Image (cartoon, coloured by chain):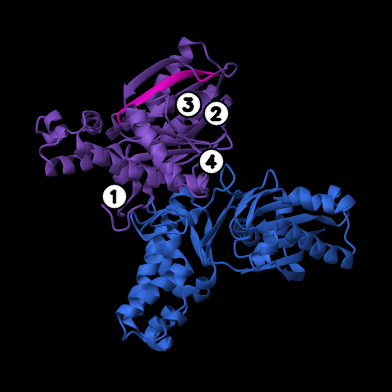
Chain colours: A purple, B blue
């Protein structure tokens, strides 16, 4: 049996054919061109799906269904994108729209939609680093802090649509402003963007730091990799910055662990490419923080990267 | 059909006979005398249960089971108290112990154990203010901040034993020290004890505050009620203090809502006796804070008080 997974992003629509084991057999994609509206975007999703369906002679006998991962607030039960800032949608019944346009095939296969971060988490559980685990939380450190929660092998995105937003927990009362309107959210301090901003500030304050040499004095070139590289070269300013950043991450994860106690937390997104340079000190800090004194949650780097979203979307059809 | 609910506290063991609707028909109790050890305490639990069983002629035909709410970390699946600071236990299989001592009856009825705050939440859902709701979180503001989570009508205490500790989320980085060893936990700022401490500090700083008059200058007499009473009399210091306290509460609840989005949150414990003086401004603050801009979680005061624990413990037998 096969599944089709759709990763609907702000930049690209990526559609993949996925087998039962979670392998991606083929991927096709198109730019989202988000300004043209969700109906025309959905038409392209259908076109991409049909190109795969025709090429592989799929029908309701060998295709279980189509799963879509979309950014924003999704009402999975109702098959609707409730709100998405990223692709400018308000309350669109994407499942019915696609089902109708697929005609007879649409009536015979499953069509599902869920939040993209949730799909990434499900992908990691079904075919990535959290395979074999019953509970997992995937935290993606990018422009923001994304989160996907799997409890008892099933996605949990809150008791009502739009929950599971672990990036918008406040960890610093009266802290830096967040795009959500509050101050001191985990996202402001824990995201790759937040980290890069912190690096820029501290590099400006310490012009002799190796970080400044690495960006040739142009702080616009600062990114989340530079402080890690500078720290490896013994830059004390970078070492201190990393310790600060990892403390913020530890606070956010501490709160998540005390609430959910998942078997494993996976860190994804750009910063996670630093692997053990990030994870090792993070584990060490958390070990002394979590409530009850016994650290029962593994911390690892996510495995699937951007493909987790496609695999997880596909696997919505059996979750 | 009947149920027996046991509320095993640090001070008293209270055992109640509960009917299918969650009404308490009879309550019996004994002091816990926690220093004598969990085996002798369990023997008293059995004696109290037997007194009810004999009085009402209960057997496996009309008694579904016995549910126990105990403080600390509980492994419900294994029927064990893993760790309890409050009654000084480390890893005791209370379910097997009681089952064995009950002889034939023990083999034929259900025996369950869960965390006491979890039982209180379940009690509110089965027979209290959250009756009819599918998801609810009960936050108890006492010496600490207790929490019980019901998702889809069932208790959730983390994916592994000892989760669901929402009082130990850090909301103020580098904040005041908490008994758990971390700094800035919700419990330090949100508990009745934390609030009383804050009231003491501010009253000391402003000796003309009405709060000082109310405790006749003796700050040892400060409690969580005084600032509410002083604020009602127009004491500006108390009004400011209340606003601060409610901001802390709102931050903790905001984080809980963004993660879980329950249909309802109930506030219990001593401070909740202030009812709308507490809940009204809290709701107002939260409305402007929660992620996604739409407040979908009701905030109410808990209904059952200390009886919630007994009813919830009893209802473990069908949850």
Q: Which residues are magenta?
A: A9-22
Say whether residue B19 is visible: no
The kind of secondary structure element at disc 3 is loop
Displayed quadrant of residue A68: top left
Front: mark 1 or 4: 1
Chain-order first, disc 2 or disc 3: 3
Which residue is more in the foreground, B222 or A294?
Answer: A294
- Is A21 part of what is drawn in magenta? yes
What number is the disc on residue A77?
4
Q: Quadrant of residue A270?
A: top left
Q: Is residue A201 above or below residue B211?
A: above
Give the mark nearer the N terminus: 1 vs 4: 4
Q: Which mark is residue A129?
A: 3
Nearest to the eye among marks 2 and 3: give it.
Answer: 3
- Disc 4 is placed on an element classified as loop
Residue B93 seen in the current view: yes
């Amino acid at each position: 049996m096969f599944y089709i997974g759709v990763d609907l992003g702000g930049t690209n629509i990526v559609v993949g054919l996925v087998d039962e084991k979670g392998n991606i057999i083929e991927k096709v994609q198109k730019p989202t061109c988000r300004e043209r509206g969700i109906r025309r975007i959905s038409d392209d999703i259908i076109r991409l799906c049909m190109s795969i369906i025709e090429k592989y002679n799929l029908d309701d006998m060998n295709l279980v269904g189509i799963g879509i991962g979309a950014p924003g607030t999704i009402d999975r039960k109702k098959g609707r994108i409730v709100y998405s800032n990223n692709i400018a949608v308000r309350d669109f019944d994407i499942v019915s729209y696609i089902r109708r346009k697929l005609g007879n095939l649409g009536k015979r296969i499953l069509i599902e939609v869920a939040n993209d971060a949730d799909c990434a988490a499900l992908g990691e559980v079904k075919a990535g680093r959290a395979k074999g685990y019953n509970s997992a939380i995937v935290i993606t450190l990018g422009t923001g802090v994304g989160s996907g929660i799997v409890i008892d092998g099933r996605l949990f995105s809150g008791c009502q649509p739009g929950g599971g937003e672990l990036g918008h927990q406040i960890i610093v009362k009266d802290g830096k402003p967040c795009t959500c309107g509050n101050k001191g959210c985990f996202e402001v301090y824990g995201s790759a963007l937040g980290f890069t901003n912190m690096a820029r500030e501290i590099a400006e304050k310490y012009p002799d730091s190796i970080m400044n040499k690495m960006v040739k004095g142009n702080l616009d070139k600062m990114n989340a990799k530079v402080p890690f590289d500078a720290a490896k070269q013994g830059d004390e300013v970078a070492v201190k910055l990393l310790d600060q950043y990892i403390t913020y991450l530890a606070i956010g994860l501490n709160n998540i662990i005390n609430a959910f106690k998942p078997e494993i937390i996976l860190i994804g997104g750009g910063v996670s490419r630093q692997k053990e340079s990030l994870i090792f000190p993070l584990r060490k800090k958390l070990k002394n923080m979590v409530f009850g004194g016994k650290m029962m949650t593994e911390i690892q780097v996510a495995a699937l990267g951007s493909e987790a979203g496609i695999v997880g979307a596909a696997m919505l059809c059996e979750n």
